[in-house]
Amino acid sequence: MATAAAAAAATPRRRRGKGGKGPNSDLSRTLTDCTRRGDAAAAMAAFDAAAAASGPADLLLAAHQYNQLLHLLASADHASFPAAPPAAAARRVFAHMLDAGAPPSEATITSLARAVAPSDPDEAFQLVATMHSTYGLAPRLRSYSPVLSAFRHAGNSTKAYAVEAHMISSAISPEEPELAALLEVSAKAGDTDKVYEYMHKLRRAVGCVTNDTAEALEGWFRSEEAAMAGKAEWDAHQVKDAVVANGGGCHQLGWLHTGPWTVQRVKVGMGGDCGGCGCRLASVDIDMEETHTFADSVSGLALERETKANFSQFQSSLKTWWLVAMSAQLLLAQVTGPKPVIRDN
């Protein structure tokens, strides 16, 4: 099946007339009404009727009207289009839009990608990947989400990784839905290293996951691949040092030990007691970046509550004490040998 871009390229473009607002006000009102009701089938019926009445060459819509149609088709129920899928209608609308000279926007390409992704994720990815080079448009996170979702359902981990790589090259960071998709497709592929990578990315990106993400995580830990992943032997001191260095309670040395995981959902009481094992949560370990952010927040709060001069003087005295203490430690080490050194945690 020809793509929308190829179909548009086959026909010369025409310029819209000055001040053109579409062939008639009836179609404009119908499109607006269908958008409010979310009725993609009725909107396309009105579009086709107007094209038949005036001829496709004379049917010129404003850019936002084409976007209305594409937005409706992107979220349309396939049952409403028994003759042809919404993707086919979306390609036809987009080709007409380009032929009419209406400028596409990022929302245009994103809606088209959403419409074609379920049936042809490769075409959807091509649309998003060439958005900048073809139309000078910068893709957004929402542009990639339907493509990743399609490759997730198709179980194509290689293509999903390619989408993430393109996101990074566009300076776009995946959020929870995208990371969950990447984690799940990695788990289905049995790629243990990638699962480990995306779990840590997910840990750094969100503080509390949604139920869909939790189910993807549970699916991994209940799998045979998760039970088999891991090192049989490791250096306990290395692990301890890595946890201290990385913070967040994470060593980031890969999967350790093998065997089935115990997976269950529990609640933590107001007193910090775990409803599963009965142990009490003693503290929450955070990484160094979060530690510095927390310290800066405390300093900012203290500056708001105290006079700036007094607090700045207190900060200066701390730095002076630190330099004196470090000098004393170094002098003592030279005289008596190695001693514990004060750490700036």
Image (cartoon, rainbow, N blue to C red):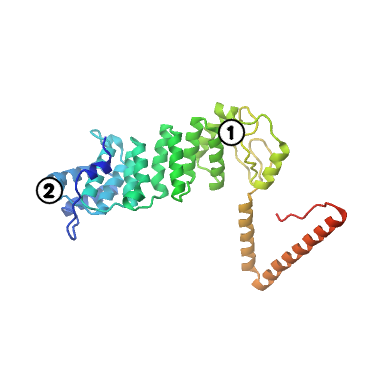
Tell how many labels. Answer: 2
Which image quadrant: the N terminus?
top left
Q: Amino acid at mark 2?
A: Ser
131 sits left or right of 205 in the view: left
Report which residue position mark 1 lands on.
Answer: 264
Question: Which of these two is toward me, 324 or 150?
Answer: 324
Q: Is residue 90 visible?
A: no
Question: Image height check: is 256 above or below 329?
Answer: above
Q: Residue at x 28, y 49 (%)?
A: 68
Q: Position of residue 93 (x, y in %)?
A: 24, 45
Q: Amino acid at mark 1?
A: Gln
Hey, which residue is sitting farthest front in the picture? 334
Q: Residue at x 69, y 34 (%)?
A: 234
Q: Are marks 2 and 1 in contact (CB under 8 Å)?
A: no
Q: Earlier in the sequence, mark 2 or mark 1?
A: 2
206 sits left or right of 7 in the view: right
Q: Position of residue 15 (x, y in %)?
A: 19, 55
199 sits left or right of 62 in the view: right
Which image quadrant: the C terminus?
bottom right
Q: Secondary structure at mark 2?
A: helix
Question: Dot 2: within a 10 Å radius of its alpha carbon, few (fewer than 14), some, or many (20 or more) residues?
Answer: few
Q: Position of residue 319 (x, y in %)?
A: 72, 65
Report which residue position mark 2 lands on.
Answer: 54
Q: Position of residue 154 (x, y in %)?
A: 41, 32
Q: Is residue 61 visible?
A: yes
Question: Which of these two is toward me, 96 or 268?
Answer: 96
Q: Secondary structure at mark 1?
A: loop
Q: Residue at x 40, y 50 (%)?
A: 140
